[in-house]
Image: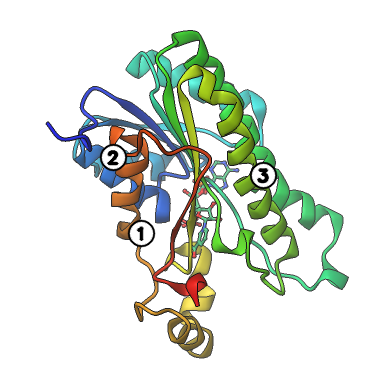
Amino acid sequence: MTMFDLSGRVAVVTGGNRGIGLGMAHGLAGAGAAVAVWGRDEERNRSAAAGLPGEAAGVACDVTDRGSVEAAMASTLDRFGKVDALFANAGVSGAAAIQDLDEAEWQRVLGADLTGVYRTVQVVVRHLQERGEGGSIVLTASIFGSLGLPYSAHYSAAKGGVVNLARSLAVYLARFGIRVNALSPGWVATAMTEEVVAHEKSYAAAMARTPLRRIGDPSDFAGPAVFLASDASRFMTGAELVVDGGFSAG
Ligand code: NAP
């Protein structure tokens, strides 16, 4: 047994039915964790869970709806009996210059990417505290929480908020043995970035700025997820783990 072993642990991955979340879910299941895949699309949840190499279940959840998050938690506890790790990863993006960024669009992105994270963490923390055995919480932020994306002020603002939410939660929740870290991807080829990756010029620009000379793949997040959920990161809390091929280092 290594310190990366997750046997006997239960992990929730919001937005785990595709993209980066699915990459993380594969890593967690491969290391022995049972995984609850939370997302809105029930068919995608089911097929993602069925493809994982261990015990897994799809659970319907919309992080913008408190009742839905509470119901997802109840059904996860029914199925697995406990939760040890939460990956609050569900998110949406958007593009608009500030002059055209209307309030509905601002609220849509902040509602999922920042308030959705707060809501999910709150529901899971109540369980972790009651259980009294600690836990690990990982918030998917973005390198664009620290760098500015010119046409996504709402997205950058939300992700910057997520990074500092992780720090604040870390300082408070340490007393319950609960660690909280942020994981910040760079450019990764997923449904979210389809247009950027399909666009020859923007793809070339992202590649040119990436020292490792490629765009990220969801499978690049398996190892970091296992590390952050496991005892291998036991002295790490309130940190931002950047996984971007070196994009933000230069
Ligand atoms: P993606 O492929 O579009 O996946 C997004 C996931 O979030 C899906 O599983 C989706 O499932 C779920 N989701 C969206 N809204 C939800 C809601 N209201 N409630 C519950 N689940 C919801 O995107 P991705 O690229 O993997 O992004 C995952 C995370 O990484 C996001 O937080 C994103 O901001 C962040 N990130 C991505 C990149 C990148 O380059 N791709 C870079 C930095 C950070 P349903 O539609 O079924 O709900």
Q: Residue at x 23, y 22 (%)?
A: 8
Vertical side of 157 occupied by 187: above or below: below
Q: Which residue is mark 3?
A: 114
Task: Check disc 3 and give the amino acid type.
Answer: Leu
Vertical side of 181 occupied by 192: above or below: below
The mark total stands at 3
Position of 63 with respect to 110 (left or right) is left
Q: Is mark 1 within 8 Å of ligand 1?
A: yes
Q: Is mark 2 within 8 Å of ligand 1?
A: no
Position of 134 with respect to 50 (left or right) is right
- Colouring scheme, one of rainbow, by chain, secondary structure, one colour: rainbow
135 or 91, nearer to the observer: 135
Around disc 1, counting alpha carbons within 10 Å, would you say few (fewer than 14), some (14 to 19), or many (20 or more)? some
Task: Check disc 1 and give the amino acid type.
Answer: Pro
Vertical side of 211 occupied by 146: above or below: above
Label drawn at residue 218: 1
Task: Check disc 2 and give the amino acid type.
Answer: Leu
Q: Residue at x 78, y 49 (%)?
A: 107
Q: Which residue is mark 2?
A: 28
Mark 3 and mark 2: Cα distance apart in space? 24 Å
136 or 100, nearer to the observer: 136
Place of residue 243 in the rendered image (x, y in percent of width and height, measured from the top left):
42, 60
The residue sitting at the front extreme is: 235
Vertical side of 85 occupied by 50: above or below: below
Query: Under tag 1, what secondary structure?
Result: helix
Q: Is residue 120 visible?
A: no
Mark 3 and mark 1: Cα distance apart in space? 22 Å
